[in-house]
Amino acid sequence: MRRVFLFTWSPDESPMREALRFGPHRVEMFAIRNGRVHCPITLPPQLVILEATPRAPVAPLVAQLDRLPAVRSVPCLLILDPEWLSMAARLPCADFLTRGFAPAEALARVDRVLGATDNMPPPSRLEFGALTVDVDGHEALIDDEPVTLTPQEFALLRHLVQHPGRALNRENLLDRVWGRDYFGGVRTVDIHVRRLRQKLGAEVQARLQTVRGVGYKWRA
């Protein structure tokens, strides 16, 4: 079952939602409200579909997706009005459909994009002593026992272990983990680091180091 995030202006009347009913997809819907897209910190999907309000500019919504940690690196399929086709090649998307598409065409485009991602190697299981971070499974384990983490705690841990030895300042962590639209202060990072250390235990937490005057880094 393929996991698809559908950002749409009309969850109840979305043509793409109807088309995806005929394929092996688990669709999670996110409504576009007042020109804004929102998505929680969660396990990334395999595909993002953006179905903007008819005749509304598409580029600003694509830019917003790039600021959401859960979907910023996920292939995107755009639903475009005919008047936007001339700029489609300049948009950072994997493929696009013209509004009014047939369901069969939509499924073919989705399968085309997902077929490309299916050939990519799965995310690594990162191991640091007793700690294993299963990026694909959205899980952290110590001595093969799961560690109970909130989505934000796991996202922070994942970002740190994916950049071992690199000092990351708090502003960078806020941007990459919480997203550019998050309005909380850098104190949020300190709170989540403290909680992570408590949950990881003495042996593992020693790898989560404070870099004075900068922020934090993960020692490989």
Image (tube, helix red, strand yellow):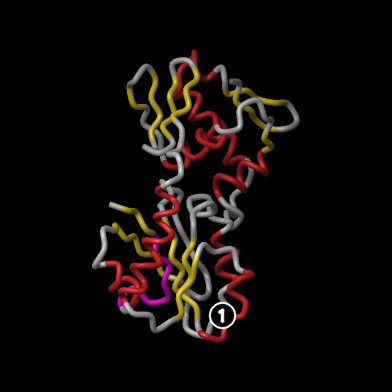
Which quarter of the figure has residue 47?
bottom left
Marks counted in the figure total 1
Which quarter of the figure has residue 214?
top right
Q: Please state which of residues 181 and 80 is positioned toward the viewer in this rendering.
A: 80
Residue 70 at x, y percent in the picture: 48, 50
Q: Quadrant of the C terminus?
A: top right
Residue 108 at x, y percent in the picture: 36, 67
Q: Residue at x 47, y 42 (%)?
A: 152
Residue 88 at x, y percent in the picture: 58, 74
Extreme top residue here?
203
Q: Residue at x 63, y 28 (%)?
A: 217
Q: Residue at x 44, y 29 (%)?
A: 125
Residue 161 at x, y percent in the picture: 55, 30
Q: Please state which of residues 53 and 156 is positioned toward the viewer in this rendering.
A: 53
Residue interval drawn in magenta: 5-12
The answer to whether residue 42 is left or right of residue 94 is: left
Q: Residues within 10 Å of mark 1 (few under 14, many from 20)?
A: few
Q: Which residue is mark 1?
A: 85
Q: Please state which of residues 150 and 9 is positioned toward the viewer in this rendering.
A: 9
Q: Please state which of residues 94 and 54 is positioned toward the viewer in this rendering.
A: 94
Q: Is residue 27 magenta?
A: no
The answer to whether residue 41 is left or right of residue 212 is: left
Q: What kind of element bears circle 1?
A: helix
Q: Amino acid at mark 1?
A: Leu
Extreme right residue here?
213
Q: Residue at x 33, y 22 (%)?
A: 145
Is residue 218 positioned above or below 187 on the image? above
